[in-house]
Amino acid sequence: MTIRLHGFPGTRTNRVRWMLEELGVDYEFVLVEILKGAHKEAGYLERHPHGRVPYFEDGEVKLLESCAAVLHLADSHPEKKLAPALGTAERAAYYQWIVYSAATLDEPVIKTYFHTVIFPPERRKQEVVDEHRPTLQAACRVLDAALAGKSYLLGDAFSAADVAVGYALNLMDQAGAIQDAPHVAAYLARLRVRPAFKKVYG
Ligand SMILES: N[C@@H](CCC(=O)N[C@@H](CS)C(=O)NCC(=O)O)C(=O)O
């Protein structure tokens, strides 16, 4: 079965790509030229009606959400042990962190990143950064407490939750928004030396 990841580098596509590289599975990467508006063209909108990336295919599985692809991949490769057993406290924490990455971190992180790093200075809006600062400061406190005394979010073992959250933390750090969070900083350094991370982020 061919796994096909449609997306664009630097976007949430990287979350899924990182997961695929952790698993070491074959996949086809289909570049969606979002800078040329390819994600808003009819052919792509048939697949992804919201006109966003990534779009993920694994046989009959078709997914519009980066975290859903991460969860699906972890479950499809139980031998890699990137998801804890069903019904355990670790599994509950795993769900929490993956949903937290998409529902709590992504938007404030990406808006802050765009308005501090990506946009040229004349397009940057300080009020956008200010609006999201309290959420990111709270995230630093939450994650720093969660990571105290642990190598990864679930303890000693790396899991798909680290891919989901690590994707957002990597951008958050580039935006200078990881502050007063030594455990988060050490954790991110640990993630960045992983071969799969290096393969995606070069
Ligand atoms: N919740 C979706 C969000 C996808 C999303 O918003 N992707 C952005 C890039 S990171 C996008 O395609 N933006 C282009 C647009 O909205 O026009 C996911 O996690 O996959």
Image (cartoon, rainbow, N blue to C red):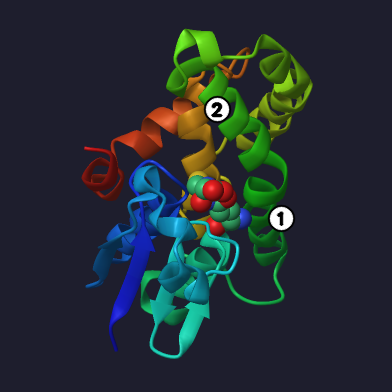
For badge 2, the amino acid type reads Val
Residue 154 visible to an observer of this rendering: no
The one of 68 and 42 positioned closer to us in this rendering: 42
Residue position marked by numbered label 2 in the rendering: 184
Q: Element under label 2?
A: helix
Name the spot of residue 26 as percent of width and height, x first. Answer: 22, 73
**Label 1, residues with CA under 10 Å away: few <14, some 14-19, many ≥20:** few
Name the spot of residue 22 as percent of width and height, x first. Answer: 32, 59
User: Who comes first in sequence, dot 2 or dot 1?
Assistant: 1
Cβ at disc 2 under 8 Å from ligand 1: no
Residue 84 visible to an observer of this rendering: yes
Name the spot of residue 65 as percent of width and height, x first. Answer: 57, 64
Residue position marked by numbered label 1 in the rendering: 96
Residue 124, labelled with which disc? none
Residue furthest front in the image: 42
For badge 1, the amino acid type reads Gln
Q: Residue at x 70, y 30 (%)?
A: 139
